[in-house]
Amino acid sequence: MDEEEALARLIALAGMGAAGASGAPDAALLRAVVEEASELGARRALARLGLADEAARDDMVDLRQLLGAWRDAKSSAWKAAVDWAVRGMLALLVVGLAVKLGLPGLLK
């Protein structure tokens, strides 16, 4: 029996007479219906995304590793850019101080 048949049988059972003393379906039966429906919906969603096969877990692991590597590279690039900008500013400051103090005249 596949999941769709199991869900259909549970819904039929809930509608037929598997009711408690109050006339409402049993809580355990409702829980089973909800669990089967959610499981079926999750499987359908994964199938639509192309993640229902055996290799999907490995694909997701690879994608997570790739995303982590991308984030690390992006962070490193920003750090390097800021580092070079700070070094450039410090170099300009040193050159400015040298010109202000007349040090280029000493080189002549």
Image: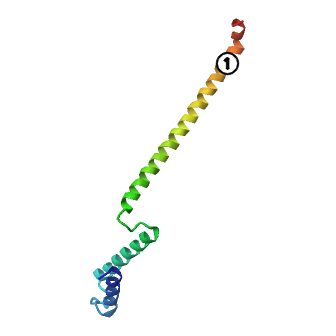
Give the image location of residue 100, x and y in percent. 71, 14
| 100 to 82, vertically: above or below | above
Amino acid type at circle 1 is: Val
Q: Position of residue 28 (x, y in %)?
A: 28, 80
Q: Residue furthest bottom?
A: 16
Q: Which residue is mark 1?
A: 95
Q: Which residue is drawn at the image coordinates 51% and 39% (left, top)?
A: 76
The quarter of the picture where residue 97 lies is top right
Quarter of the picture containing the N terminus is bottom left
In the shown orientation, is residue 92 left or right of residue 61?
A: right
* Quarter the C terminus occupies: top right
**Which x, y percent locates residue 90?**
61, 24
Left or right: 57, with 94 as reference point: left
Residue 56 against residue 100 in the figure, above or below: below
Q: Secondary structure at mark 1?
A: helix
Task: Give me the residue at 33% from left, 79% from top.
Answer: 3
Q: Is residue 82 above or below residue 34?
A: above
Q: Quadrant of residue 29?
A: bottom left
Residue positioned 68% across, 14% down in the render: 98
* Along the line of sight, the residue nearer the viewer: 98 or 22: 98
Residue located 36% across and 74% down the image: 39
The spot of residue 42 in percent (x, y) is: 40, 71
The quarter of the displayed image where residue 31 is located: bottom left
**How are the residues colored?**
rainbow
* 17 to the left or right of 95: left
Number of residue marks: 1
Number of other residues with Cα within 10 Å of mark 1, as a class: few under 14, some 14 to 19, many 20 or more: some
